[in-house]
Amino acid sequence: MAACLSVGFIAQVKRDGYTNTPFLPGQKWRVHDTERPYPHEVTPGSVLGNAPADAVVLFDGSDLSHWQQGDSGTDDSKIKPAKWLIKDGTMEVAGGTGSLFTREKFGDCQLHIEWQESRDIKGSGQGRGNSGVFLMSRYEVQVLDSYRAATYADGQAGALYGQWPPLVNPIRPPGEWQTYDIIFEAPKFDGDKLVSPAYLTLFFNGVIVHNHQKLNGETGHAVVLPYTAHGAEERIYLQDHGPRQPLRFRNIWVRRLKPYDQPEK
């Protein structure tokens, strides 16, 4: 509705701009082009971190209706109803039941997610609340307690697992909420051929830890995996790493990212 009101208002007034300026390199528009489409209006969340009006809210604290459970986000035959627990407006990993996968599929997107390790977490290295946020069921941003806790660099919280460590480690102590804001550019394929790789930008607790970083391929443990052709949109999943890895998630939403100059509605 907001977008329609905005465009309706613009249609009733004379636009500033020019019709005789040079064309912009690689674009069909002139500098300050009068006819260039206006960006759609989107109402932001009332508080920074809340979902904007055009987001798909994947978890608002009330139910798991946007999620399903299974062993593989790429095999629909193994999908079952979600069994994670809802506690105090959060969803808690029910270790050993399986990972959660979104019912909808996404490609290029902006993803916001918040997670919390137990305040009395035990274990060491990769055993400290291990999970992961997987884009397109293949490309992992690591979730782990890395607060003054040693593990391999490309496996700590905020890492593109097995590929790139975060630029810095802005993690809060266990028991406090951590925030990921992810901008993901999906890989592009022509048949089985990779045309362009995936790129990911990550703000971890408001600090940029990956800046449009190219991914080498799919995520794996102790291996280097190539890209394998897949759909333009695939599921997001949250990893169940086993019964001794308790943690919670909340406030999860995603926006599909579209190209510039979308037609006015």
Image (cartoon, rainbow, N blue to C red):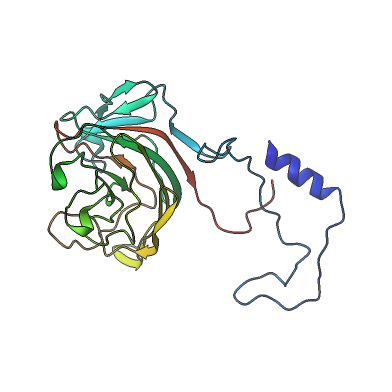
Residue 103 percent coordinates (x, y): 36, 34
Viewer can see residue 184: no
Residue 235 falls in which quadrant of the image?
top left
- Return the residue nearer the eye: 98 or 113: 113
Residue 227 percent coordinates (x, y): 26, 61
- Return the residue nearer the eye: 108 or 48: 48
Viewer can see residue 17: yes
**Left or right of residue 82: residue 125:** left
What residue do we see at 69% from left, 50% from top?
Answer: 264
Vertical placement of residue 16 versus 1, above or below: below
Give the total of numbered labels.
0
Residue 24 falls in which quadrant of the image?
bottom right
Residue 245 percent coordinates (x, y): 18, 35
State the quadrant of the C terminus. Answer: top right
What residue do we see at 56% from left, 39% from top?
Answer: 52
What residue do we see at 49% from left, 47% from top?
Answer: 256
Residue 237 percent coordinates (x, y): 30, 40
- Return the residue nearer the eye: 205 or 234: 205
State the quadrant of the N terminus. Answer: top right
**Left or right of residue 217: residue 126:** left
